[in-house]
Amino acid sequence: MTATLKDVAQRAGVSIKTVSNVVHDYVHVTEEVRKRVHTALEELNYQPNLPARYLRNGRVGVLAFAIPDLSNPYFSDLGNAIIAAASARSYTVLIDCTGGERAHESLVLDGLRPHLIDGVILIPFALEPEDLQSRQAKTPLVLLGDHLLDTDVPYDHLANSNVAAARLATNHLLHLGRRRIAAIGTLEALSIASGAGSLRRLRGYTQALAEAGLPLDAQFIIQVESYSRLNGARAMQQLLALDHPPDAVFCFNDLLALGAMRALHEAGRRIPDDVAVIGFDDIEEACFAIPSLTTIAPDKEKIGELAVSFLLGRIDGTRTSQPDRVEVPFRLIVRESTGGLTGIEEEIN
């Protein structure tokens, strides 16, 4: 039998109102009473009735974060940032994996199960502009990523500063004296949402080369099916097979870069002496790789904070302005793969 607030109140020897105050983390409860109530909650295995809460006040204190791929550490990092920002505001976050499928992402637009969540943060991969323009989402929605960023859709949208970040990454390699700089990461299926981000990173790369007076060599721009270590390794093998292989490579995410470094190692090429490597995303693996990986680090904590802040503002009605399009800040972390410090030293310093 499911325990009720009344059961908990009787076990703790307090009023139902006091139990409710503890459950909702109100401050005006003594520490001794709070401990008694928490003990009773645990002993009775109390679970809040979310649908009932929804019927009472229209909110359940739960947000959803819908991502396309659970295996990509970057999405996990974003999830942690969003969970931290939501938790600071007494919200819980549910993670939903859409697989980058249009039907599943459309389901997210319909609010999954509206009585279970108050709002959604979505990284769309397959949605088309008409999916968002032709109807309003049934729950408040914030979009992340580059897909649909340039589309007039009625939702707040956060994205990486891909052009500027890619220009910085390429300029870093140029400042090291590298002149045969390759790029790994344009996507073969540009209908995939990340295609928009890859094109922006390609634009920053080409801008940096043009500003340095270097010609664009089509052989040095390698397409991949998806952002994975395996595809990074295959792309690097393709580059090494050229008559004049590159002396540096900018990979459009860290997974590609880690795969590329493996291929270089197997080919007997020294990093960074023979080939310097830089990635994008600053996943944890980057600082523990051997050599540690230089990378562009988007401000993931800022993304989480803004996404939750924007969403809760829409939920409680305090945010009534036109939707914002925000590009988040980033920084370059120089590690061993381009001649810098080890990842661990960089983090300590």
Image (tube, helix red, strand yellow):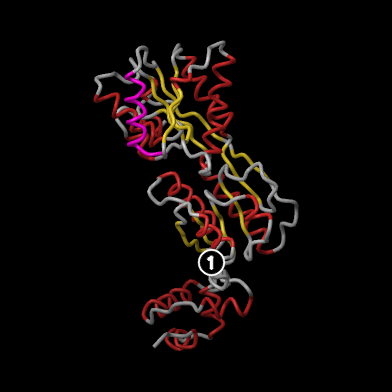
Name the spot of residue 227 as percent of width and height, x first: 41, 39
Residue at horizontal 36 percent and vertical 35 percent from the top: 231
Name the spot of residue 194 as percent of width and height, x first: 51, 41
> Taking 317 as reference, is 229 left or right?
left
Name the spot of residue 103 as percent of width and height, x first: 52, 59
Name the spot of residue 170 as percent of width and height, x first: 50, 22
Residue 93 higher or lower than 52, as above or below = above
The crowd level at tag 1 (other Cα within 10 Å; few <14, some 14-19, many 20+) is some
Label 1 sits on what residue type? Leu
> Taking 245 as reference, is 165 left or right?
right
Is residue 229 shown in magenta?
Answer: yes
Q: Which residue is mark 1?
A: 112
Is residue 35 shown in magenta?
Answer: no
Secondary structure, magenta segment, majority class: helix
- Dot 1 falls on a residue whose secondary structure is loop
Q: Magenta part of the protein: which range? A: 227-241
Residue 151 higher or lower than 249, as above or below = below
- Quick one: 321 or 195, which is closer to the camera? 195
